[in-house]
Each structure stands twice: as structure tokens, then as C-alpha cells.
Image (cartoon, rainbow, N blue to C red):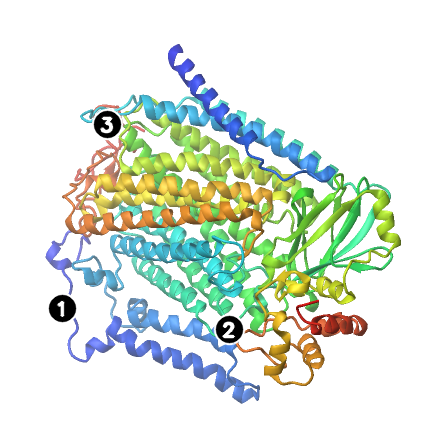
């Protein structure tokens, strides 16, 4: 290979590398890191990115140079030189990628091991997924429809489900874990950044999958202590908490709860629906629809509502939920 | 008859068509009209009768009836169209017809709609059928991209949306990419190795006819009362065991497509091992043959596993067997282990034949031997072996045994090495070449660049911590489309354009071909590159509704995807118009050395008048006077030095 072509190749590789680096830096590819695990995962991401930009630049340079220099003219019927291979070159391009992927594997394995460390005294929160809601149970037995965790402490999430597979993900924490029936799977998060971030289900779990969302409040240790002391009372009527814990919003629209699901009937119209169904009082109709969803189906909707709520929601909470829904959209 | 291939072409002419009432009983579409309903009735009556005898109620149980019907009705169709005629004839003890060519070769367009044993007819049947499913699958993608143009519900409810997503993937994988390669391989492999046909021509014909059966099943499943298959192409238990009835159509459709795939792979293996022309050693085989050899090994070993996984979930539903029901003592993750033990090798099933196509195209269009030919073949074998050791990288967040994650990460990383060897060897093949930028070459170059991006995003996903972040997001959607569309589909286009002159005898329109390439290449990147970003930022896959902050970029992706879809129209027009009105291509328009180009276009019905004598390597470009094979040579010709 002539020296001139090496210089040209290097120049193209540099330009390609510069463009890739600009794209990698100018666009905020990753969400902000709100936990130690996310910081480590982002480090792995950048480590891989640097290697990939290097590999891509070399390939792009060779490809561009080849396409530019070795095109045949319109009347050129000649063949190229009968080169069959070059053992040294083939060893080099087998060995270098092998070294690079080994480096990535080592870094990834170390990060993976660190991200699984829960320390001696983690806060343990039981996460229960169901179609289509998240609930979070604290050591004191309290259950909420959203997650509240303090900064600076390892939190071990013990995740399970009773119906189908779901997956717990907070993009800003870079930790994800499937909830599997019959298994309890754990992940560790160590929040560092105060804020409210989305909890998303990432495993297709049925009709309400897209709206199976909740949120995590990351608060300072002092605020967390205060939250625990007050019992984490959410603002609003008690029925709202029941509504959220059971994921009603995944399928139903109900303005007071700011939910927008469209899998099931719009609960803003409950009064009119109950009148049309003609199955007793409004409260009786609501209760029957929750406990025995198949007893009466609103025309145009499938028999898709889980049959678990009759046993899952304790009688007191069921009453709060019925009251909340019966109070209508303007509350 | 002493010499099977010494007779003249008149003897190969089709026998007289059956007349009178025999037209109803001879294999063909008329028999389909009455025999298929008969089998349908049998499938309906049997379970009802058995349930009645056992005193089970209700007599008409949807899931049971559908499971039985999806075996009997397709079987009836295959019997009726004539897929089993010869074997039935043989098994019933009638005199055998050793050299019966009645259903071999195409003399009119009607022969493409019959059971035909000519691998060239079957190859074209495959390619055309799969392109139809490609268009249907693409249409589904455009429909759900329309839904995704804005957050919230626009056109489809979540059920319909999930059905469209599931069907898009299932059709593209099982009815397009895998069988399209089987079709191209079918056409080219016997020609390339100097054989008159495949080893088992009747099995070959039957393999093809399973394909429309499987495709119809998947499509009919969509309009089943209660709803179509809606648990994604991965069909994870226990979700899919509790889906509406359409899911059974998916479970069974995969069986038929899988059976077709396994039978074709067996056929390829036996053909390649036993039917190579004299002098065609393994180290003289074109890389396309090597690629299909390795792919076929993958298929016969892996495909039974997806068949098993789909049977198990179906049994969970229909027979309450609790394979994957935690409440009944089942093991939920067992499904994923079995499923991915097929479905990861399946991604190599969907790319290795493409590697073969690219090796052919690049060598011919650069006028140079394939660089490092032996290492290219060995890296295919390395991918084959390693491909079976990486499946659990799909399950890093699934909750499987923790110790499995690092070993599976390492093997997934290592498989990048033989893949890298192939990319570097293609680049080195082009280096110093005399490159012709024909349409197949453009698709080959597009493939290399897109596959490098897809391969590098694969390195991200092999790293467990990054995969934990990116799993089940649009980053995965971007990655899979870079390797499967930018990878496999580009190679299929390269292969179709490259062998179009051989298959039809006509040349495609080069200008339209290049237009098709550029529209596809640009549309593809505009559609799929932004998905990396929204995925990492937090948009999960398989959702009809999403957070408002992704609205603008999703609108952009949707518009780009419509452009990408429209580019297919250029391809279809070019294919149809060139087939009808294209200029004559001649036997060897690319001046290639491999055997399929040494015969006329399209080739004679039995490929070679004389068995060719292979005397050298397939890619000796640049060596004046070098020959890969001598046609019509006397059998005493000594074998040339390797």
C-alpha cells in the first residue's frame, strides 16, 4: 500500500470519527442519571461508544476509500489482481476485535457485579405488578401506588406478579427487572438525585400495557423520614389511592384521577352507563362491575377486565373506591 | 431407460392433461375445491363426536376445534393439491414410475400454481410468495406507524394494535426472510453445485406448499372472533396462553412454517453433501453454498425447539397442561429458554444465507477472488457453533439464574469476532478491485454499512448493564431492524437483482433498481436511526400510546416509514415490468465464473446437458484463463489441481 493512500485513509477515518463523536456528544442520548447504578451503566455506555466509534471510523474510511478509488470505468472489462488473502492481516483483524470485546466484557462484568450490591442495610420494598398497575409495599406494611425512596441509601426492590410477566423500569435509574409469576426477582437502586421519574412497564402484558405507568419520588433522607412519619398520605380522597394502586387508569379514563386509558369504558360517564345498564343503584352497579366484571358488559367492549379485584381489594377500600367513582367527574 | 438424462426434451413435455371426471380426482385446484371441505368436516366432526361420547360439554369448544382444524384442513389442502400423490401411489403398491417428470419444470405460467418438482419453479414460487407476504407485513407496519404518529389512540384500539405488531413481525420472519432465503437457495444451489435438481424434489415441492398454508393461517387468525394473536411474535407465556382464540392460529401457523423450513434444510443438506458435481470439493464450493449448508444445520437443530415451545403454550391453553403456569407448578421462564434456544440461532438463520449472497455479489462485481475464502467459510461454521451458546442474552432482565449472565455476555461478544472477519474480508475483496456499481452491488454496500451499525449496537446489547437499560425499548427495535432490514432484507434484494436475469432470462431496469436502492437506503435510516434515541430515553416497545415528549420524533419516524414503504412500489414495478418487457439478459451478464451462469437464462429444465466437471476455485477473477468448471467435458478429464 502506498504512503499516500494510507494518509488519505487516515484522513477519512479522522473525519468519520469526528462526525460520530459530534453526533454522540451533541444529542443527549441517555436520560439523566438519578442513581449510582445509572452512573456506572452510563460509564459502560461511553466506554463501548468510544470503541465503537473507533471501529466504525476505520470501516467507514476503508469503505469510502474503496468506493471512491476502485470504481471501474464504463468500458473497463478488466479484473482486479488475483489476491486470495493475507494471513497476517487476517490474524490482525481477528485478534484486535477479540481484544476489544474482551475489554468490554470485563468492564461490563465489573459494573454488573457492583450494580447488584445492596450493602448491609438496604431499604426493602416489595413491588407487585399486575394487569395494569404497580404497587409498592414498605417494611411497615403500608402499600402505595407509587414508589418513594430516599437518596443515599441502597434500596432493594423485590419484584413479583400474580398474573403475567411485567417489567419494572425507571429510565433514569437504568435498572430493569421482569416481574415473573411464581418468582421473586430483586434489583438494587441507590438514588442520588432528587426528583420524580416515571416507572414504566416494558414487557407486553396485555391491553393496558402502554398505560401501566407509575412514578418514583426520590426525596432527601429528611423528607423521606417525614413521609414515613405521616404515613405517606397522598392528597385527595382515599378512593384515589385505591384507584391508583389497582391500576384502574391503565384501562379507564377518569378525569379526577387524570387517567386516560381507553381499553375499558370511560368512567366519567358512569352515571349514564349505569342508567343504560339498569342493574340497581349507581353504587351497586359500580361494585358489581369491579367484583364481577363479566356480569354486565358495556356494549362494544370485550370481557377483558381481570377478575381479581373482588378478592384483591379489601372491603373497606372497595367502599372508598366505589364512593370515589360514584362522585362523578367533577370533584 | 438406461441413462436418466439422455432422452430428448420432447420426452420431458407435460403428459396430456386429465380429461373428464378425472380432472376432479387428479391433484390440483379442482380437487382442492371438494377435498379440503371434506377434511374440514372431518376435523369438525371428530372432536365433537369424541366429546359427545365422553359426555363433555360444551360440544363446540373453540380452542379444541381450532387446534384440530388447523391440522386437518391444511392436510386436506396439501393432499388435494397433490403434495402426497407420488408417495401415495408408491405406498399403495402400484408400479413405481422411476423417471416420471410429469410435474417437473414450467412450460406455462399455470405450472407455477401447481405442485412442481423443479427446484427452479419452486425457487420462483418461494420468492414471489414471500414478496407478497413482505408487502402485507410492511403494510401492517405502516398501519401501526400511522397509529404511532401521535400519542394517544388514533385509529386502533390496543387489541388491534397488538395484533398488527405481532403479525408484522411473524410475517416478516416466518413468511418472508427465512423462506425468501430458502427460495433463492432453492433456485441457485443445485445449479451452483452442478446438480440436476435437489436431492428430494417431491419433498421440496411439499415444503413450498406448506408456506401459503402457514401464511394463510396467520392472516386468518387476525379476524378470529375475540381477536387475533396479540402477544407479540415472541408469544411469551403465560400471557399468550390467555389471549383470544386467534393466538392458536399463531401457534399452529408457526408449526407449518417451521416444518417447511426443516424439510427444506434437510433437502439442502443432502443435496449439498451428496450431489456435488465431480471435482466440486467442499473447498471449491461457492460461499453461498457454504452459507446455506451452515444455515441448514442451524435450522434442523434449532427449529424443533420453537415448534416445541408453541406446542407447549397451546397445550397449556387447550389441554390445561401447566407447562408454564406458575399456579399449576409450571416454570414460566422455561418458555423463554426454549423459545430463544431457537430464536437466537434464528437470527443467524436469517443472516448467514445473506452473507453468502453478499460474498457472491462482491466478488463478481469487484472482479476479484473472495479475500480469505477459507476463513470466510470457517467463520460461518464458528457462528453456527457459537450461535447456540448465546440465547440467554435475550433474558438478561428476565430473572433467570444470575450466574448465566456473564458467560452468555462473553459468548455474545465473541460471536462478533467471526462476524467482523466477514466484514473485513468483504472490504479486502473490494480493495484494488474494479467495482461495478450495479443494483446488487449497491445493496451489498448498503448491507455492509447498515450491518456494521447493527452489529455495533449489538455490542451495546451484549454488555449486560447496557442491555438492562435498553432491553424492551425502541433501542431494541432499532437494533433488530438494522440487522434484519439493513442486514437480511438488503441481502435478499441484492440476491433477487443479482439472479433476476438468471431466473427470468430478462435484465431488470438498472435505473429503477438504483432508484429503489437509494429510496430504501434513505427511508430506512430516517425511519430506524432515531429509534435508538427514543429507546435509550425511555420509550418502551409494543405500546400504542406513549409519553408526549416523544411525539415529534415519532411523527418524523412515521412519515419516514411511509416513504420507506412506498419505495417498495419501485421494486415491484421494476420486477413485473422487466419480467414482461425487459431486454434479453443472456446466459452470463455478470461474467461470473460460478456454475449457474454457465448455462442459459433461464436454465434448461434439467440444468445441465452434461454433468459439469469442476476444475478450480469459484472466484478466480484476475487469473487469465482460469476455469471453475468445464461443461460438456468427457468424464475422463483429470481433476485439476486445487
Q: Quadrant of residue B594?
A: top left
Q: Quadrant of residue A213?
A: bottom right
- Among the two numbered marks 2 and 3 on one chain, the one whose residue lies closer to the N terminus: 2
- Among the two numbered marks 1 and 2 on one chain, the one whose residue lies closer to the N terminus: 1
The residues bearing labels 2 and 3 have C-alpha atoms spaced at a distance of 64 Å
The residues bearing labels 3 and 1 have C-alpha atoms spaced at a distance of 46 Å
Q: Secondary structure at mark 3?
A: loop
Asked if labels 2 and 1 touch by Cβ distance under 8 angstroms, the answer is no
Q: Which residue is mark 2?
A: B226
Q: Quadrant of residue B496?
A: top left
Relative to residue A262, is residue A115 depicted above or below? above
Marks 1, 2: nearer the viewer: 2
Q: Which residue is mark 1?
A: B16
User: Residue B499, position in %: x, y?
Assistant: 26, 43
Residue that protrudes farthest toward the top in the picture: A3
Question: Are labels 1 and 2 on one chain?
Answer: yes
Residue that protrudes farthest toward the right in the picture: A229
Image quadrant occupied by the C terminus of chain A = bottom right
User: Residue B19, position in %: x, y?
Assistant: 15, 76
Callout 3 crowding tier (Cα within 10 Å): few <14, some 14–19, many ≥20: some
Q: Secondary structure at mark 2?
A: loop
Asked if labels 1 and 3 touch by Cβ distance under 8 angstroms, the answer is no
Amino acid at each position: 500500500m502506498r504512503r499516500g493512500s494510507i494518509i488519505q485513509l487516515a484522513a477519512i477515518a479522522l473525519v468519520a470519527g469526528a462526525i460520530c463523536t459530534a453526533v454522540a456528544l451533541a444529542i443527549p442520548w441517555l436520560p439523566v442519571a438519578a442513581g449510582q447504578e445509572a452512573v456506572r451503566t452510563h460509564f459502560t455506555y461511553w466506554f463501548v461508544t468510544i470503541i465503537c466509534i473507533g471501529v466504525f471510523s476505520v470501516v467507514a474510511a476503508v469503505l469510502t476509500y474503496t468506493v471512491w478509488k476502485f470504481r471501474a470505468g464504463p468500458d473497463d472489462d478488466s479484473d482486479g489482481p488475483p489476491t486470495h488473502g493475507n494471513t497476517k492481516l487476517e490474524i490482525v483483524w481477528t485478534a484486535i476485535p477479540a481484544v476489544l470485546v474482551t475489554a468490554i466484557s470485563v468492564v461490563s462484568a465489573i459494573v454488573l457485579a457492583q450494580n447488584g450490591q445492596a450493602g448491609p442495610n438496604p431499604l426493602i420494598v416489595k413491588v407487585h405488578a399486575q394487569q395494569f398497575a404497580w404497587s409498592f409495599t414498605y417494611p411497615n406494611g403500608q402499600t402505595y401506588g407509587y414508589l418513594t425512596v430516599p437518596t443515599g441509601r441502597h434500596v432493594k426492590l423485590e419484584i413479583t406478579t400474580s398474573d403475567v410477566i411485567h417489567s419494572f423500569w425507571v429510565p433514569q435509574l437504568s435498572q430493569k427487572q421482569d416481574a415473573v409469576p411464581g418468582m421473586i426477582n430483586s434489583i438494587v437502586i441507590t438514588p442520588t438525585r432528587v426528583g420524580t421519574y416515571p416507572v414504566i412497564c416494558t414487557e407486553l402484558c396485555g391491553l393496558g400495557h402502554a398505560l401501566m405507568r407509575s412514578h418514583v419520588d426520590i426525596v432527601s433522607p429528611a423528607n423521606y423520614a417525614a413521609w414515613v412519619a405521616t404515613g405517606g398520605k397522598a392528597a385527595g380522597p382515599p378512593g384515589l389511592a385505591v384507584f391508583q394502586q389497582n391500576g384502574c387508569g391503565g384501562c379507564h379514563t377518569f378525569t379526577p384521577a387524570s387517567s386516560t386509558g381507553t381499553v375499558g369504558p370511560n368512567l366519567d360517564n358512569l352515571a349514564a352507563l349505569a342508567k343504560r345498564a339498569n342493574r340497581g343503584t349507581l353504587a351497586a352497579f359500580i361494585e358489581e362491575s369491579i367484583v364481577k366484571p363479566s356480569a354486565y358488559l358495556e356494549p362494544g367492549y370485550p370481557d377483558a377486565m381481570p377478575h381479581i379485584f373482588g378478592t384483591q381489594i379489601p372491603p373497606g377500600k372497595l367502599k372508598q373506591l366505589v364512593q370515589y367513582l360514584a362522585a362523578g367527574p367533577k370533584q | 431407460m438406461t441413462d436418466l438424462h439422455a432422452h430428448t426434451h420432447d420426452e420431458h413435455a407435460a403428459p396430456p392433461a386429465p380429461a373428464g371426471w378425472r380432472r376432479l380426482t387428479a391433484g390440483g385446484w379442482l380437487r382442492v375445491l371438494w377435498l379440503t371441505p371434506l377434511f374440514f368436516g372431518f376435523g369438525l366432526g371428530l372432536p365433537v363426536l369424541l366429546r359427545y361420547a365422553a359426555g363433555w360439554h360444551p360440544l363446540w369448544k373453540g380452542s379444541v376445534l381450532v387446534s384440530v382444524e388447523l391440522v386437518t384442513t391444511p392436510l386436506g389442502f396439501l393432499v388435494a393439491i397433490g403434495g402426497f400423490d407420488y408417495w401415495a401411489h408408491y405406498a399403495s403398491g402400484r408400479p413405481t414410475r422411476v423417471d416420471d417428470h410429469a410435474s417437473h419444470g414450467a412450460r406455462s405460467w399455470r405450472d407455477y400454481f401447481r405442485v412442481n418438482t423443479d427446484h427452479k419453479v419452486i425457487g420462483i414460487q418461494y420468492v414471489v410468495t414471500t414478496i407478497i407476504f413482505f408487502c402485507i407485513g410492511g403494510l401492517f407496519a405502516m398501519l401501526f406507524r400511522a397509529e404511532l404518529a401521535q400519542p394517544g389512540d388514533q385509529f386502533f384500539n390496543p387489541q388491534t394494535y397488538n395484533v398488527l405488531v405481532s403479525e408484522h413481525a411473524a410475517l416478516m420472519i416466518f413468511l418472508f426472510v427465512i423462506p425468501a432465503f430458502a427460495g433463492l437457495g432453492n433456485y441457485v444451489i443445485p445449479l451452483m453445485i452442478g446438480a440436476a435438481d435437489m436431492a428430494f424434489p417431491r419433498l421440496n415441492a411439499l415444503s413450498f406448499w406448506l408456506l401459503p398454508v402457514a401464511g394463510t393461517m396467520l392472516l386468518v387468525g387476525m379476524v378470529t372472533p375475540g381477536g387475533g394473536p396479540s402477544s407479540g411474535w415472541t408469544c411469551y407465556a403465560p400471557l399468550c396462553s390467555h389471549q383470544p382464540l386467534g393466538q392458536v392460529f399463531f401457534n399452529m401457523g408457526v408449526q407449518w412454517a417451521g416444518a417447511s423450513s426443516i424439510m427444506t434444510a434437510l433437502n439442502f443438506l443432502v443435496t449439498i453433501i451428496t450431489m456435488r458435481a465431480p471435482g466440486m470439493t467442499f473447498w471449491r464450493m461457492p460461499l453461498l453454498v457454504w452459507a446455506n449448508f451452515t444455515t441448514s444445520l442451524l435450522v434442523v437443530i434449532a427449529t424443533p425447539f420453537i415448534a416445541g415451545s408453541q406446542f407447549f403454550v397451546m397445550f397449556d391453553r387447550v389441554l390445561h397442561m401447566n407447562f408454564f403456569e406458575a399456579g399449576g407448578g409450571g416454570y414460566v421462564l422455561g418458555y423463554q429458554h426454549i423459545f430463544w434456544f431457537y430464536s437466537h440461532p434464528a437470527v443467524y438463520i436469517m443472516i448467514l444465507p445473506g452473507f453468502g449472497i453478499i460474498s457472491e455479489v462482491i466478488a463478481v462485481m469487484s472482479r476479484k477472488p473472495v479475500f480469505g475464502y477459507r476463513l470466510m467459510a470457517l467463520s460461518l461454521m464458528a457462528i453456527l457453533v457459537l450461535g447456540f451458546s448465546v440465547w440467554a442474552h435475550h433474558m438478561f432482565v428476565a430473572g433467570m439464574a444470575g450466574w448465566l449472565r456473564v458467560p452468555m455476555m462473553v459468548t455474545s461478544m465473541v460471536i462478533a469476532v467471526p462476524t467482523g472477519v466477514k466484514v473485513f474480508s468483504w472490504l479486502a475483496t473490494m480493495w484494488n478491485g474494479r467495482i461495478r456499481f450495479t443494483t446488487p452491488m449497491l445493496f451489498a454496500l448498503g448491507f455492509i454499512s447498515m450491518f456494521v451499525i447493527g452489529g455495533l449496537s449489538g455490542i451495546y446489547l451484549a454488555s449486560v448493564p447496557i442491555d438492562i437499560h435498553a432491553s424492551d425499548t425502541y433501542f431494541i427495535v432499532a437494533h433488530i431492524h438494522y440487522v434484519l432490514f439493513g442486514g437480511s432484507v438488503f441481502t435478499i434484494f441484492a440476491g433477487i437483482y443479482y439472479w433476476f436475469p438468471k431466473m427470468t432470462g430478462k435484465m431488470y431496469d438498472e435505473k429503477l433498481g438504483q432508484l429503489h436502492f437509494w429510496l430504501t437506503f434513505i427511508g430506512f435510516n430516517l425511519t430506524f436511526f432515531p429509534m435508538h434515541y427514543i429507546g435509550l430515553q425511555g420509550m418502551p416497545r409494543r405500546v400504542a400510546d406513549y409519553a408526549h415528549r416523544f411525539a415529534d420524533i415519532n411523527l418524523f419516524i412515521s412519515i419516514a416509514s411511509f416513504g420507506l414503504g412506498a419505495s417498495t412500489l419501485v421494486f415491484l414495478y421494476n420486477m413485473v415490468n422487466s419480467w414482461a418487457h425487459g431486454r434479453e439478459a443472456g446466459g452470463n451478464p455478470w461474467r461470473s465464473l460460478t456454475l449457474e451462469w454457465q448455462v442459459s437464462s433461464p436454465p434448461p429444465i434439467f440444468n445441465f446437458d452434461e454433468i459439469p466437471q469442476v476444475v478450480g476455485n469459484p472466484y478466480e477473477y484476475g487469473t487469465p484463463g482460469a476455469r471453475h468448471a468445464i461443461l460438456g467435458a468427457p468424464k475422463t478429464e483429470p481433476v485439476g489441481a486445487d
